[in-house]
Image: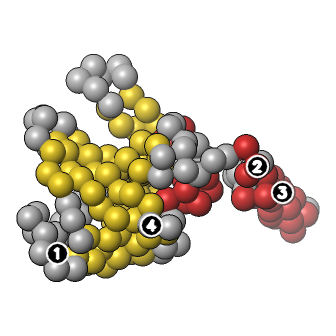
Amino acid sequence: MKIFLKNCHYRCFLFSLLLLLTECFSSCQKDEDIDWSNIDISNIENLYEQPLPVIKKCIQGKWRWTMITGRCTTMAQSIINTFVEISENNVVITSEGYNPVKIPNTTFSYSWKRVKIDVSLNPRHTITTYSLWPRKKGINAWWFFGIINDILIVEIYNPDGIYDTYRFERVK
């Protein structure tokens, strides 16, 4: 009788685990589930609302870094001779020649995290999106607002709660 009960508990545990794993894998959106014919990766204003496979496909590639803007100020700084290459696992930033804003050459790997972000001074106005989370200390998380005419708008979350905005132009 004890052996039967142990086997029954074991079977119930395995069955529950199998159901949980099935639900987990079936609820994830895969590349093949997305209708790519309706997505213009050159113009997608609400990139932050998209599933992770869409965000990944839209941001991967080589970009020319054109501007940094701070949210707490209207000052924008132009960036020249600096490129950002986003691949499946890494971001590579390279500056070539003179640049009025000192941006060091760097490479970092990253992971993705689903995060809630306050997008205004009103704490009730939050969005939930995927954030590119660098594995290198000293680099803040990036989330992607949109792409307008091949200009990628990247919001950088700073620990003090102030956002900086980067603008990258797609290199064709």
Asked if marks 3 and 2 touch (Cβ < 8 Å), the reply is: no
Asked if marks 1 and 3 touch (Cβ < 8 Å), the reply is: no
Distance, label 3 to label 2, CA atoms, is 39 Å
The residue carrying mark 2 is 37
**Which residue is at a point 35% across and 69% down the rendered structure image?**
84
Q: Earlier in the sequence, mark 1 or mark 4?
A: 1
Q: Please give left or right for residue 31 compared with residue 143 in the image.
A: right
Q: Earlier in the sequence, mark 4 or mark 3?
A: 3
Q: Earlier in the sequence, mark 2 or mark 4?
A: 2
Asked if marks 2 and 4 touch (Cβ < 8 Å), the reply is: no
The residue carrying mark 1 is 104
Q: Please give left or right for residue 16 compared with residue 143 in the image.
A: right
Distance, label 1 to label 4, CA atoms, is 20 Å
Distance, label 4 to label 3, CA atoms, is 51 Å
User: 155 or 169, which lies in front?
Assistant: 169
Question: Could you say where residue 52 lies in the image, as x and y percent from the top left?
Answer: 58, 52
